[in-house]
Image (cartoon, rainbow, N blue to C red):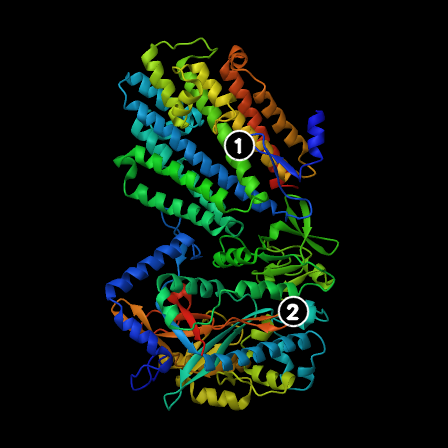
Amino acid sequence: MLNERIEDHLPALLIETATGALRVSNASHLETKPMLSRTADHLFWMARYMERAENTARLLDVNYQTSLLPQSSEATLQGWKGLLSISELMPDYLERFDTVNARDVMAFMVTDANNPSSILNCLRAARENARAVRGALTTEVWETMNQTWLEYNRLVKEGALAKDPGELFEWVKFRSHLSRGVTLGTMLQDESFHFQRIGTFLERADNTARLLDVKFHARNTEFFGSGVGNEGKEVDFYHWSAVLRSVSAFEVYRKVYRNVIRPEKVAELLILRAEMPRSLVYCMDEVVSNLRAVANDQSHETIRRAGRLRADLQFSRIDEILATGLHAYLTQFLDRVSDLGYGVSRDFLMPV
Amino acid sequence: MRFFDEMHSADAAVRDHYQVYERWLARQAGAQMRARREEAEMIFRRVGITFAVYGDKDEDGSGTERLIPFDLIPRIIPAAEWREMEAGLRQRVTAMNRFLDDIYHDQEILKAGVIPAEPVLNNAQFRKEMMGLSVPDGIYAIIAGIDIVRACNPDGSGTYYVLEDNLRVPSGVSYMLENRKMTMRLFPELFAEHRVAPVAHYPDLLLDTLRAVAPASVNEPTAVVLTPGMHNSAYFEHAFLAQQMGVELVEGKDLFVKEDFVYMRTTRGPQRVDVIYRRVDDDFMDPEVFRKDSTLGVAGLLRAYRAGNVTLANAFGTGIADDKSIYPYVPKMIEFYLGEKPILQNVPTHICREPDALKYTLDNLADLVVKEVHGAGGYGMLVGPAATKAEIEDFRKVLLANPGNYIAQPTLSLSTCPTYVESGIAPRHIDLRPFVLSGKDVQMVPGGLTRVALKEGSLVVNSSQGGGTKDTWVLEE
C-alpha cells in the first residue's frame, strides 16, 4: 500500500516496464496531448481484435496439428469440441452444423462471415476500427491493417484453407506479429500507443487463460496437479507439447525447466512466469504499466484492481493454485480480466 | 466543335511545355506502362485511398469503397500561365470574402445597386443567423476550391474560365497530394528531367491558415477536423488531412458546448477546441439552429461562434457567394471591392431575370446550357445542343414561367489531355480545381486537382460518374 501511494506521485516521470526496469517517460516539462475518447476506444479494439485473430489461429493450428497425430477419433473430436467451448461458441455452431468435425469447425472459425468470432470477422473488425481512426495511426500501421484484411480475403477466395490450413494460420500469426512490430517501431509512444497495448494484453490474458482452461479440462474434469492423465505418458507428451506449441512455448519450456513436460510446469509457465510473453503475469504487467501511463482522475479503482490482480499472480505458487483447482482459478481470473475491460471502457473510452 | 488540347497544338505539334514529357513517353514500352497502372491501383487500394459509394455493397463487405481511377499522364501547366491564374484566384477569393463580410454586415454592394437584393436576400444560402456576426479578419471562405476549365477560341488558342466556385466544403485536395506521391513513386526519373513545383506542403499551409484564423484571445489554438464519419464519401480525405496536420479528427458526438465554449471529450477529460475545420454542411452543424434531426453536428455551436469563442472553417453561410445566381456578379464584386479588373474570366452568363438576357436565351436555346440557379447535380437543366426540339419547347415554357430562376451559358468545349483508355492513349476532357487558403495571407500550392472524364466525348468529370484524376504539374522556369 505504501509503495503504491509513493508511485502515485511519480506517474509522469517513471514508468515501470514489464521487466521491472524503470525508464524515464513524459518528462514533466514536455506536455503530451490528450486524445479523443472515441479514438482511444477504436485503438483499444483494433488491438484486441488483431490479438484475437492471432490467438484463434494459434488454437486452430494446434488442434489441426494434433489431429494429424495418431490418436483416437474420440480424442480428436474432444479437441474440436474444446475449441468451440473455449470461445463460448458451441451453441452458435450447433445451430448451423449438425456434427462437430474438423472441416466444419475450421470453416466456422476461419472464413464464416456469420460467426462474429471468426478470424475473418476479427480481421474485419480490426481493420474497420483502424479505418475509423486512421489519422491517429502511422501510415505503416494503417497500411498493415488494411493490407492484412485485403490479403486475407484474397487468400480465402483462393481456397487457402482447404489447400494448407497450417500455412494460413502461420500467415495470420505473421500478420499479427507484423502489426505489433510496426506499432512498436513507428508509433509515438503516447496515449494512443498505451491504449493499444492495454487492448492487446487484456485480450491475450483472456485467451491464454481460456486455452489453459480448456486443455486442462480436456484431460480431467478438474485438475489439482495430480499428474498423468488417463491415456498414458506418450499421449500426455503430445497433448502438453501441443499446448506449449500453440503459444510458441515449446522451446521456452525446455529452456526454462530443462526437464520432461509435466502439466503442472506447463501451467506454471503459462500463468506465473513473468519472462514468458504470453503468460498471465506478463500480460498483467503490461496492462498495469500501460494503465499507469494513461491514468486520469477517474481511473484509480481500475488501476488498483489491475495492480491487485498482478500482485496475486506475482506472489502465487503453482501448487497453491492447483490445490484450489485450476478451473476455478482460471474462471475467477477471466472474470477479473473482463471486469478490467469494463473499467477501462468506463474510465477512458466512453466517459459520460 | 473544336477542342483545345493541352499537349498538342492545332497542327498536332507538341506544345513546348510537353516536349520533354512526350519524348519520354514515346520511349516507354506499352507493357511497362500497363504494369505501372496496375501497380498504382494496387498501391491506392493498400493505402485505402477510396471513396464510398452510397447504398452499394458486395459480398466481402469492402464493396462500398471504390478507387478513383488515376491516369498516368500528368496535366502540365507552364509557369507563366500559373502565375496569372494564381493572381486571378487570389483576387477572386479575396473579393468573395469581402462580399461575404459586406453581405452579413452593411450590404453596401446591394445599396450601391451593383447586385440586386432579391437573389441575395431571398436565397436559401443566405443565413440570417450570420447577420452582424464578425469572424476573425473578415475571412469566411478560409478554404476555397475554384473550378477552372479551358475553352477553345476561334483562332485555336485557349482561355481559362472559372466554371464554378466552391466555398462550402470543397473536397479533392487529398487526391492532388496522393497523385503527386504516386507519380514520384512510379516515375522518379521524370522529376529529374522536369522542374515540377512541389505541392506536398499543402497540409502545412492549411494548418498555418487554420491557426491564423483562431479567436484572437487564444495563444496556442487547438484545431480539429470535423467529419460526418467513416461512411462519408470523402472520409479518406478528412482522415488524411487530420493526420497530415497532426490534429484530431472528430465527429459531432466527440464535441460539446458548455458556457459558449466548444470542448472535445478526451481520455483526460474535456479539452477546449478553438478552430473547427468542418467537412459537414451548414444544415447539419447545429441542431439548435439548423436541422433539428442532425446527429452530425454540435448543439450550441452557433452560440459559441457568436460569442467569438470558436472559429469555423468555413464560416456558416458562405454558400451565398458560390450560388449560381450570384456567380454572374463575381466580376462586378471584384471591381466594386478591389477596384480592379478581373484577371480570371467568368463563363459568359445570361441572367434570365434581365429582359435582354432572357430574350437572347429564348432566341438561342438550341445552343445554350440553361441552369436552375439553386439547382445542383444537373437537375432542372437544359443542354441545348443535346436536346430534342420537343424538349427545348417544353423548357421554353418552364423558363418563361419563372425567368428569375435561370441562367444561361454557352456550351463550353472543355480542353482535352492525352489519357490512357482501353484502346491506348486518347484525348479526354479535363478541368482543374486549385485550392485557395485565406488567413492572414492568401496562400495556395501550385496547380490543383485535375479531373478527367474517362468516357469518350463526356464532359462529366465527377468521380461518381466515371471520372478519374491526373497529377497536375506546374513547371518552374
Helix, strand or loop at label 2? It is loop
- Judging depth in this view, the residue of B111 and A139 nearest the camera is A139
Q: Position of residue B177 (x, y in %)?
A: 46, 64
Identity of the amino acid at label 1?
Leu
Q: Is residue B219 above or below residue A126?
A: below
Helix, strand or loop at label 1? It is helix
Assess disc 1: are there few (<14), some (14-19) or many (≥20) residues with their C-alpha within 10 Å of its C-alpha: many
Query: In the picture, which quadrant includes the C terminus of chain A?
Result: top right
Closer to viewer: mark 1 or mark 2: 1
Query: What residue would you read off at disc 2?
Result: B127
- Residue at 64% x, 31% y: name it: A303
Tell me where residue B215 sits by quadrant: bottom right
Tell me where residue B420 sits by quadrant: bottom left
Assess disc 2: are there few (<14), some (14-19) or many (≥20) residues with their C-alpha within 10 Å of its C-alpha: some
Q: Position of residue B364 (x, y in %)?
A: 42, 88
- Disc ID at residue A202: 1
Identity of the amino acid at label 2?
Arg
Horizontal side of residue A131 vs B341, given as left or right = left
- Judging depth in this view, the residue of B317 and A318 nearest the camera is A318
Q: Position of residue B465 (x, y in %)?
A: 39, 66
As measured in the structure, the alpha-carbon distance from the residue carrying label 1 to the one carrying label 2 is 51 Å
- Judging depth in this view, the residue of A163 and A137 nearest the camera is A137
- Judging depth in this view, the residue of B235 and B5 nearest the camera is B5
Q: Chain of mark 1?
A: A
Horizontal side of residue B423 vs B289, given as left or right = left
Tell me where residue A118 sits by quadrant: top left
Q: Does the image show residue B398?
A: no
Q: Is residue B190 above or below residue A94?
A: below
Q: Chain of mark 2?
A: B
Q: Position of residue B369 (x, y in %)?
A: 43, 80
- Residue at 58% x, 57% y: name it: B225
